[in-house]
Image (cartoon, rainbow, N blue to C red):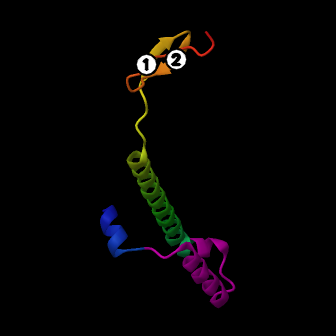
Amino acid sequence: MDFIESVMFKPDTPANVRKKIQEYVKKNPDASEADVLEEFGPSLQRAIKFEKKQKDKKATERSDRMLIKKANNAKAQMMKGGMANGKVHMYAAGGSVTDKNA
């Protein structure tokens, strides 16, 4: 049902609903706040909910793209070689660990 609602019955934006409320109030100045809420409340709530869902979807897509980009750009890290002279050393390409201050 969610797909059908989003495709067939796309709601107005909250700004459009508020504009319709203002026009309604201008045409019916004696209308109470309860009448206005009864008339436009559900459509305003639906518009706000739809807008929030769209923002969440865009944020999720953006974060997914950032994660993929980070994964593609990640550099390979050196493996830890072990301890020598009380210090952690990395593997070197065929070298040995020497202490400069012997």
User: The C terminus lies in which quarter of the figure?
Assistant: top right
Residue plotted at (30% across, 68% down): 4
Nearer to me, 76 or 1: 76
What residue did someone put label 2 on? 88
**Residue 68 location, x and y as percent?**
39, 50
Q: Residue at x 42, y 41 (%)?
A: 75
The x and y percentages for residue 47 are 50, 69
Residue 29 belongs to the span the image colors magenta: yes
Which residue: 40% across, 74% down? 10
Magenta residue span: 11-37
Q: Which label belongs to residue 57?
A: none
User: x and y percent of residue 78 in the render?
Assistant: 43, 29
Give the structural element (helix, strand or loop) at label 1. strand
Between 9 and 73, the residue placed more toward the observer is 73
Q: Which residue is mark 1?
A: 81
Does residue 92 lie above or below 64 as drawn?
Answer: above
